[in-house]
Amino acid sequence: MGEGLLAGVLGAGAIVGATLFGAWTGRPALADGEAGLVCAGALALYLSFAGAGRALIGIAALLGVCLALQAPQAAAGIVLAERGRVQSVVVTSIEDGRAAEGGHARYLCSVEGSDGVPLKVRIWRGCGEATRPGDALAVVADPEGRVPPRGAQAGAGVSGPLRDLAPWVAALVAGSLIAVVRSYRLSGSAETVIPPGAGEAGRR
């Protein structure tokens, strides 16, 4: 159990840590989750060498991939919560994003800064049905420009992105723990002990 718990914690920590480091330092290969996918593959490879069943290895690998895909957004949120600065932008156009979001009510605002330069990303936090071109919105931007800005949200902090990742981290740790524990049981059940003289008794 200790080995499985350690493998899961190290695997999840490597996935999240690599993505957060990439977002903080502006390394796209790490911030986009590619390094997290490599870490997920390394964890699956370790479980394979440990003798875990294929089904459990597949489940752990799938959970690792899901965590790696969720980590970039959470890492960007952590960076903005730590060093982001709130600034005012002006709405230039509004798009109804309900079709793209599967019918959910979400509006996307194209905005530009006070210098008239359009932002490359569209903002949905604070953008609603009542928003009109020329309205002002508050966004949180990274002064170093390493993560894209997003709409300001009251009470946003580091705890929010971490809560979003917590279920995936817990699932990956649990999956790794079960896979390692089952690998010991499988190896133990595969061993057969033949008592001395059993072969002679069978021939008689």
Image: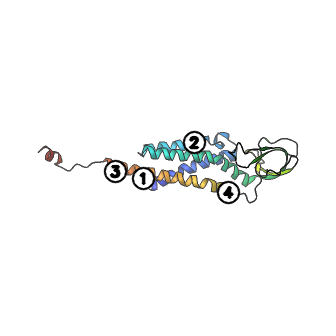
**Considering the numbered disc 1 on the image, is that residue within a helix, a strand or a loop?**
helix
- Which of labels 4 and 2 is toward the front? 4
- Report the side of 174 relative to 197 (left or right): right
- Name the amino acid type tagged 3: Gly
Please tell me which of labels 2 and 3 falls first in the chain.
2
Residue 181: assigned label: 1
Percent from the top left, x then y, of residue 151? 77, 51
Q: How far is disc 2 from disc 1 in space, using C-alphas?
A: 24 Å
- Name the amino acid type tagged 2: Leu
Q: How far is disc 2 from disc 3 in space, using C-alphas?
A: 32 Å
Q: How far is disc 3 from disc 1 in space, using C-alphas?
A: 11 Å
Tell me where residue 202 sits by quadrant: top left
Q: Which residue is mark 3?
A: 188
Percent from the top left, x then y, of residue 14? 57, 48
Q: Which residue is mark 2?
A: 37
Q: How far is disc 4 from disc 2 in space, using C-alphas?
A: 23 Å
Residue 160: assigned label: 4
